[in-house]
Image: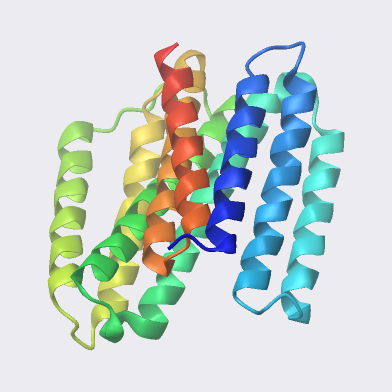
Amino acid sequence: MIGAYEVIAIALSVLVLTGIKLMSSPQTAVQGNRIGAVAMLAAVIAVLMYNGIIDAPLLWIAIFTGGAIGYIMAKRVKMIQMPQMVALLNGFGGGASALVALVEIFERYQEMIFSGRLSSQLALVVGAITLGGSLIAAAKLDRRISQQPVILIHHNWISNTILLITGLLVIVASITSTSGIIFVSLVIAVLALVYGVLFAIRVGGADMPITISLLNSLSGLAGAICGFTIGDLSLVAIGAIVGASGLDRKST
């Protein structure tokens, strides 16, 4: 039976989707951005209330600190620098999902069934890839590193080997609950982060907007998978919407 929280989650997801739709046009982009921001803030408050932690002081300190930093960054950034700003925010989103997945792995991995273990490891992988790739994309667009494609010797072989090893470790971590699972998860996170760097560093500055759209999609996907790990409908729905919007922009 659908409860009040599920109804609120669906309503807020519709608002986020509406905001993203409005942001596709210059005439309605500001309105869409505001709708999306308010919906996301409402979703955060709803999650805190649903889990009975809305009165936790540390959470509010973190929210206000992060909000202040984000406001200052948004006010100072020039319009021409917006792509790298978006890339950086994509990375933060993926990194947040990876951190949540790590916390879940650290605290209750022994209690999880196979689906929970698999979703936590996938959220860790996708989130770390998004973080690594987005940081490189932002650095390239901001000319902190060369905008030319950087291709290592045997680049494809190295990337594919890292991806294969990461996949095998995810499978092993999902079917076992050994005492070394925390170490294995940290290795998975590092490998995924390196893969994200290798993935983005070979892309030139001119093609980076397409890569950023893909990373935006991965950021939403990481959030959605993380939602399955912690059992939160809002995170699943909104993450899926963000992921789909990124793929849509990439296709256009």
Front residue of 240 and 80: 240
Q: For this rendering, which residue is in front, 84 or 223? A: 223
Residue shown at the point (76%, 44%) measured from the top left: 38
Q: At which x and y percent is residue 106?
A: 39, 81
42 relative position to 151: left or right? right
Q: Judge left or right: residue 108 versus residue 139.
A: left
210 is higher (above) or lower (below) than 74: above
Q: Classify 91 as above or below 241.
A: below
Q: Residue 92: where, in percent of width, then height?
A: 58, 50
* Res. 204 visible in picture: no
Look at 75% across and 63% down and name the residue there.
63
Where, quadrant-wise, is the C terminus in this rendering?
top left
- Asked whether 118 or 231 is in front, the reply is 231
Which residue sits at x=42%, y=59%?
226
Whether residue 40 is visible: yes
* Rendered residue at 73%/31% (across/down): 33
Q: Position of residue 129 (x, y in %)?
A: 38, 47
Establish if 23 lies above or below 53. above
Q: Based on the displayed image, in which of its 4 quarters is residue 140 positioned?
A: top right
Q: Quadrant of the N terminus?
A: bottom left
What is the total number of numbered labels drawn onto the structure image?
A: 0
Color encoding of the figure: rainbow
Horizontal arrangement in the rendering, residue 116 relative to residue 98 (left or right): left
Residue sitting farthest toward the bottom: 179
Q: Position of residue 198 (x, y in %)?
A: 34, 39
Q: Quadrant of residue 168?
A: bottom left
